[in-house]
Image (cartoon, rainbow, N blue to C red):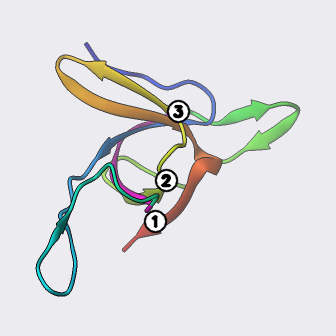
Amino acid sequence: MNLKPLFDRVVLKNIKQKNMTKTGIIIPETVGDEPILAEVVAVGPGGFVDGNEIKMYVKVGDKVITSKYSGTEVKCDGVEYNIVRQSDILAIVE
């Protein structure tokens, strides 16, 4: 099954990161409100949303940063994805 986002939505797959202190202590994912690094796996067509034209700036394969609690989490074929609006993406990582 494939996810095909509508309008200004973007499907993201989280990239697992090991959060570690300078002394080598691993911090669990459940601690803190740090932003999430993710990879774009699908992009909606953009178009008109609430009367405003939305141009899509991200593309499949981009690495992006989103806030921890943005979007909707879904599970498809055993893989977890997050569907967000393009405006919920904070930055593209180059």
Sort mark 3 into few (<14), some (14-19) or many (20+) by Cα contacts within 10 Å: some
Q: Which residue is mark 3?
A: 44
- At horizontal 32% and vertical 49% (from top left) the residue drawn is 30
Amino acid type at image mark 1: Ile
Q: Residue at x 84, y 30 (%)?
A: 50
Q: Secondary structure at mark 2?
A: loop
Provide the residue designation for mark 1.
Answer: 92
**What kind of element bears circle 3?**
loop
Q: Earlier in the sequence, mark 1 or mark 3?
A: 3
Is there CB contact under 8 Å for labels 1 and 2? Answer: yes
Residue 87, percent from left and from top: 65, 49
Q: Label 1 to label 3, Cα distance in Å?
A: 17 Å
Q: Which residues are magenta?
A: 34-44
Tell me which label, 2 or 3, sits earlier in the chain.
3
Label drawn at residue 58? 2
Asked if residue 61 is positioned above or below residue 93 in the image, the reply reads: above
